[in-house]
Amino acid sequence: MIRVPRPAFHLTPRRNWMNDPNGLVHHSGLWHAYFQYNPESSDWGNMSWGHASSTDLAHWTEHPVALRHRPGEQIFSGSVVAEQDGGRLIAHYTSAYDDGRQAQSRAVSDDGGLTWSPDLENPVLDRGTTSFRDPKVVRFPTADGRDRWILVAVEADARQVLFYGSDDLRTWEHLSSFGPLGPGGVVWECPDLVPLAVDDDPDDIRWVLLLSTNPVGDDADPRGSAMSWIAGTFDGIAFTPDTRRFARLDEGRDLYAGVTFDSAPDGEAVMLAWMSNWRYAHAIPSSPWRGAMSLPRRLSLRRDCRGRVRLRQEPPVFVREHLADTPSKVVLAARPFAELALTGHSLLELEWDPRTTGSLRLRLAGDADAFAELSHDPETATLRFERGGPDAEAVHPDFASACTTGLIEDGSTRRLLISLDGPLLEVFADDGAATITHLVMLGDGPVVASLQTERAGAVRASTAHLAADRPTEALAAALA
Ligand code: FRU
């Protein structure tokens, strides 16, 4: 059996099963991430909220289970907000009852998110239906300067997003519903509604609806789970999209259930997502843990050279800082082939001009009988990713796969930022206008990146290696 190294700078549970991020909130200097967790096994079940926190989004400390399943009730996905007055944290989550009903419940924490008291009147929002879930509470600024609370949830089977409003975070009034829209044969899950300024223009705010879709039915799409986004307006009651179609958020196979943190500093939209796919999540051969979160990504809206508004996802500051500190900068000039040594927990940034190099190929291989390969084709302005080899095929029949993403055709320098942390590969192209997020099975040792260009030309490569180290002292101090 292939060995899967534990990521060094991503959130994983010490042991057992993890899926969606839940209750993301920044509070008293700490980033809190709760997550779908099975406290008893490394398979899905007994769903509860696990809990971890971080001062820097790179090092995470796991805490005791925050909300535990009970006889007859599992705790499905949801969100946390920090109350404006009083400093309490309020969670909304889905109570998934054994009789099939799904309804929204509430819990309060008075100690900064370590312990939680479920409301005695739970569930607080019940439609008597069986796929009503994943409440995300967001703030809508009103004219008097106070926030009104908006709860966004799905009727998953009906492919609808439901909007509710509240002034007290307890009584919820139905405002509107959105959908269905786009392809059938999927359930809608884990919505979020995020206000973002186009090109940082405070007078051009769009509300971006994030959505996760998972194929269902006998002949389900083998590509499995995926995230989408659509920009529009939200007037405090209803969401009106700017276009008629959702756009895919990431072309890779392994980014799902992404939602943003409440109360992030400077009002930034920081998204964390589960790095797996329901198609084969149960088969990932990691132990004693199963499931990991993506890098926390800063979301923004940018117009591309054709004037289209695109969602940009940027890696967190610590990634940029590590690359800026990097001692190794390699310039490949007259050689069309080079090898770069990575540790398996590495960042790699490549910069080149396709007009001189022609196409470019980067192949990653470690001690497993598997590979991951990226190739850029300047003719079609596409980036293709493929993972394969016997050890990848052994994970699951649908694990070995390929995908392609279109890039902005502006003819100039190309930049790719690649984060490899054990099995987690995240590729940011065009400064995050396109991303490819994939699990890879390269083994437990160092990784070699082989770089090849069609014609001899300069490729600038920066690498940084991150070690698995202990939680920072700042975190220990913050928790004390
Ligand atoms: C998405 C999801 C959610 C649900 C949770 C259960 O991955 O299916 O809709 O709340 O996982 O673990």
Image (cartoon, rainbow, N blue to C red):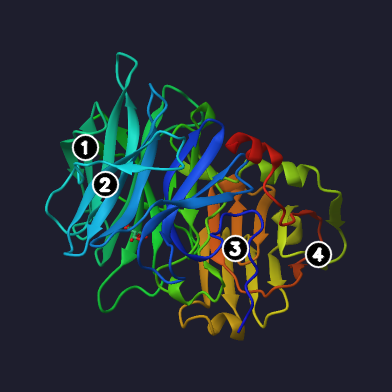
Q: CA distance from mark 4 to mark 2?
A: 46 Å
Q: Looking at the image, tell me whether mark 3 or mark 1 is earlier in sequence order.
A: 1
Task: Kindly identify the amino acid type of the residue bearing the numbered disc 2.
Answer: Ala
Q: Is residue 56 above or below residue 99?
A: above
Q: Which residue has dot 2 on it?
A: 153
Is residue 325 left or right of 184 when viewed as pictured? right
Give the image quadrant in which the ligand numbered 1 is located: bottom left
Secondary structure type for disc 4 = strand
Q: Nearer the viewer, residue 86 or 166?
A: 86
Q: Which residue has dot 1 on it?
A: 164
Task: Kindly identify the amino acid type of the residue bearing the numbered disc 4.
Answer: Leu
Q: What residue do we see at 50% from left, 42% from top? A: 32
Q: Which residue has dot 3 on it?
A: 424
Is residue 261 left or right of 432 when viewed as pictured? left
Task: Kindly identify the amino acid type of the residue bearing the numbered disc 1.
Answer: Tyr
Quadrant in which the C terminus appears: top right
Q: Which residue has dot 4 on it?
A: 340
Mark 4 or 3, closer to the camera: 3
Q: What residue do we see at 18% from left, 63% from top? A: 100
Task: Kindly identify the amino acid type of the residue bearing the numbered disc 3.
Answer: Leu
Q: Using a 10 Å C-alpha cutoff, classify the residue at mark 2 as few (fewer than 14 neighbours), some (14 to 19) or many (20 or more).
A: many
Q: Using a 10 Å C-alpha cutoff, classify the residue at mark 3 as few (fewer than 14 neighbours), some (14 to 19) or many (20 or more).
A: many
Q: CA distance from mark 4 to mark 1?
A: 52 Å
Q: Using a 10 Å C-alpha cutoff, classify the residue at mark 1 as few (fewer than 14 neighbours), some (14 to 19) or many (20 or more).
A: many
